[in-house]
Amino acid sequence: MFARLGGLVVRARWLVIALAVGVLAVGGVWGTRVVDSLSDGGFYPEHGPSAEADRRIEKEFGRQNADVVVVYTSDRSTIDDASFTDPVRDKLSDIAERSEVADVRSYFGTRSPAFVSRDEHSTFAVVSLVGTDEETRADQFEKVKELLPVPGTTTLVGGREAALADFNKKTEEGILTAEIIATPILTVLMLIIFGGVVAASMPLVVGVLAVLGGFTITRLLTQVTDISVFAINVITIIGLGLAIDYSLFIVSRFREELAAGADERTAVVRTMATAGRTVVVSGATVLLALAGLLIVPLPFLHGIALGGGAAIGVAIVSALVVLPAVLVVLGRRIDALGIRGRGGPRRRDTSGDTSRGDGLGMWARIGSAVMRRPAAWLVGVLAVLIVAATPFLHATFETVDERVLPAGTESRVVAETLKSEFPGGADGTLLLMVDGGGRTAAETVGGAIKRMDHVASVTPIATEGGATLLQVKATDGEQGPGTRALARQLDRLAPPEGTTLHVSGLAAQVNDQMDAIADGLPWLALTVVGVTLVMLFFAFGSVLMPIKAVLMNLVSIGAAFGAVVWSFQDGHLAGILGFTARPVEASNLVLILVLLFGLATDYEVFLLSRVREEWDVSGDNTRSVMVGMQRTGGIITAAALLLIVVVATFTTGGVSFLKLIGIGMTVAIFVDATLVRMVLVPATMRILGDANWWAPRPLRRFYATYGIRESAEVPAARGRAATESETTTV
């Protein structure tokens, strides 16, 4: 099948290249505007109890969200001075008349001391917008924001919409900064790794196609569903990452075939029959693993699964169709503009004594050293990785708040000012709607709540018909453990007869998020692990190999999670990377888990595909491992190094979400490409011996019939005319 695809690409190479140019044009002009269509939220279940409570409360009492919070401060005057209060009151009255504004709550309308700072030099107002969706409210916020400043006062604008606007801006700036830093580093490294300008440009071709194609498909998807703004980060990371991996693997194999004497057309067909097969297995596994995010009922993850999946799909097609078309056109010019001493494919001598590995180069010697004492290496490396994972044992979880933004960001300053300077500003807020029963039922419920732990106050803030809205202030902050426990208690509170209770607020949303993750995670794990086991069996025909691969993946991911908690939650890298230490956002870890599992399997497939290829020829387990390591050790290390450059630069962004991804993925990729692939894999394969390739007889027959492998060898180098007119049977 893959050789036939290679033959087809050879014949249609100019058409393929023309279509690729068209994709680049559409993606560059239209696809890059995808940011304008992306969603800001999606961190909480759409159908969770708190989301349902929000809808019920909004229906009865209107929106209660603090869309915009504006703080006015006078250095000389207090709230009792007309010179300060009159201009502020007039401004808020004008704002309340705007068509974009649903409600304005302030000291001037409520006379509540909560709106006045302790030194009485500041006051704040809460503005609710009329928009019913995020895009509309974002547009309304931009219009209202320009009208809020009052001459003679210091005006700071915060609240949900301001925070989201800052978040999006900092995210875009972070991605741009990462690209500015990564691009020259990647350029130099690719020149060194590929040995020439032309060869080094191949990952760029596939990478740009993957990213722009991913953007274009994602923008199309936004017409029918919400896609999180974070999908941009994932598309960039996974698109470039897989483009680098697949380009390295295919270009390296193409050069091998040219060095073995094949003409460029035969070299492409052979490359597709071997490296192309590996790309399909790897890409399908990563794609299906990412699709597992659809199981967890969080729209944020669903959008990332769709956007990231689009990038993976385009990367696979680009590597299997566009890259071979370019290679057959370039032919031996792939080594043009080579770096002195590094240009051109290198012939590999495989005739040495493979029992010692001295005929296969550095990577085979590493494998030989490991396999001489496999148990010692296995125990030692596992001990190191287990220690690295231990910080995760004390992980705590919260959701996104102002602390993910850099210190000094205006919306963060507003949130911090409210907490530090206004009475009750550090308290958490929960809303409880008592639906039915009137005032009597509300008083009964309020009395029960006052007897609960962590309650600062209970205040009726609105009445409509027989429904009452209670504001419950909690003493442990917006999403502290005490506030979240209180939200659980309110959910379980028995309502008076004839009434129903509906609980809303950030702590309730966090509880719903954690419940959604806890409910979906087992099914996600089952899906990701199941897909990996099945795909690796189809690729290698072994029962133990897929199981071992899953265990190796979990080891490297455990070390990455430990590093995230140690650096991010414990704050050991906070000063260096410039972020505020805080608990980990659980949905981010789910995302990192799936991305890392897919990428780790990617490297596993690269290594084991060459090991299996040698095993089919020699039947010698030790030799197969060393040949596989020699053939792929440099490729895996180079791919990992280039991907580390991409993800590590995300730690330079302003949003701590990007830093968390950068830290976790950098550690995991480094561990996976070094300790796992180069030490644990050969050690375990040496210990298992021929059992590596064992499968029960029925599964062996199944693999022989349906396995993803070559059933016939691609013929040796042939003339141009033969390759043009004939498709090889595989």
Image (cartoon, rainbow, N blue to C red):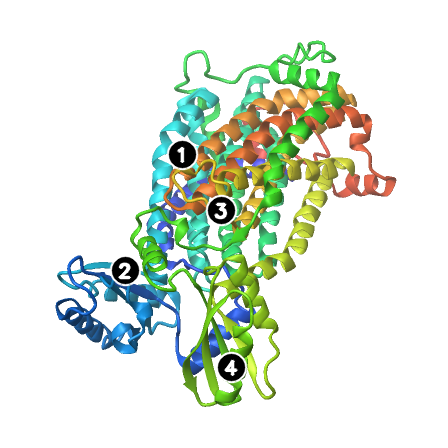
Q: Nearer the viewer, mark 3 or mark 1?
A: 1
First-in-chain label (1 vs 4)? 4
In 3D space, how far apart are the residues under numbered discs 3 and 1 (Cα atoms)? 32 Å
Q: Residues within 10 Å of mark 1 (few under 14, many from 20)?
A: few
Q: Which residue is mark 1?
A: 576
- Dots 3, 2 in contact, CB < 8 A: no
Q: Nearer the viewer, mark 4 or mark 2?
A: 4
Residue pictured at 82% horizontal, 30% vertical: 691
The answer to which of 196 and 523 lies nearer the viewer is: 523
Q: Is residue 172 visible?
A: yes
Amino acid type indicated by mark 2: Val
Amino acid type indicated by mark 3: Ala
Relative placement, left or right, of 446 versus 177 is right
- Per the rendering, the mark at residue 434 is 4
In 3D space, how far apart are the residues under numbered discs 4 and 2 (Cα atoms)? 32 Å
First-in-chain label (2 vs 1)? 2
Residue pictured at 47% horizontal, 22% vertical: 193
In 3D space, how far apart are the residues under numbered discs 1 and 4 (Cα atoms)? 49 Å
- Label 2 SS: strand
Relative placement, left or right, of 698 versus 602 is right
| Quarter of the image with the N terminus in it | top right
First-in-chain label (3 vs 4)? 3
- Label 4 SS: strand
Amino acid type indicated by mark 4: Val
Q: Which residue is mark 3?
A: 311
Q: Nearer the viewer, mark 3 or mark 2?
A: 2
Q: Which residue is mark 2?
A: 157
First-in-chain label (4 vs 2)? 2
